[in-house]
Image: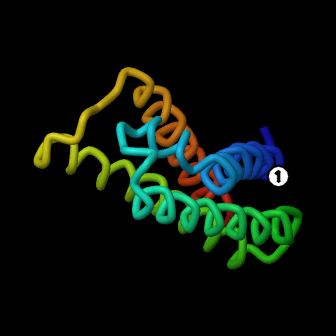
Amino acid sequence: MTRQTFMLIVIVYGFILGFVMFFLPGFAVSAYAGNPENVNETSTMRFLGAFQIGFNFVAIAIRTSTDTKVIRTYLLATAGVLFGSLGIGMYYVFTNQVPFLPSNWLDVFIWVSLGLGCLYFWNKEK
């Protein structure tokens, strides 16, 4: 798989996630055991969805770039977001007793896979 193809997979996943978070924040909140009636939770989810959508527009703009610094920065930042989010989520599951739903295993698998892929291509881009 080429780096451009991998980035396209990350972009498509990011847009799906971002659009669900932005346009269906109640559904997204409930998928993480939150309260879809809580305006603070849904507005935060909508904000994160907008951020995710914007981040993916940047990725589209640089996907075919030949500037190694730009690509490596994007890949490292994406890996940081994925592993950082995973770490924060696990911290709250184990310390604050936030429920870990069976469907969350899919998120863990996707985030670890994409994060490792980002690190692989980050290392490959020299």
Front residue of 101/82: it is 101
Total label count? 1
Q: Is residue 66 left or right of residue 47?
A: right
Q: Is residue 95 left or right of residue 37?
A: left
User: Tag 1: Cα neighbours inside 10 Å, few (<14), some, or many (≥20)?
Assistant: some
Quadrant of residue 40 in the image?
bottom left
Residue drawn at x 82%, y 45% as measured from the top left = 5
Quadrant occupied by the N terminus? top right
Q: Is residue 126 left or right of residue 34?
A: right
Residue drawn at x 71%, y 77% as measured from the top left = 70
Residue 84 place in picture, x, y as percent: 38, 59
Q: Amino acid at mark 1?
A: Gln
Quadrant occupied by the C terminus? bottom right
Q: Is residue 28 left or right of residue 19?
A: left
Helix, strand or loop for disc 1: helix
Residue drawn at x 44%, y 24% as measured from the top left = 103
Q: Report the coloring of the rendering.
A: rainbow
Residue 60 place in picture, x, y as percent: 83, 63
- The residue wearing badge 1 is 4
The extreme top residue here reads 102
Residue 48 place in picture, x, y as percent: 54, 63
Residue 113 place in picture, x, y as percent: 53, 37
Quadrant of residue 63 in the image?
bottom right
The extreme front residue here reads 37
Front residue of 3/126: it is 3
Front residue of 98/14: it is 98
* On screen, residue 48 above or below 27: below
Residue drawn at x 75%, y 43% as measured from the top left = 9
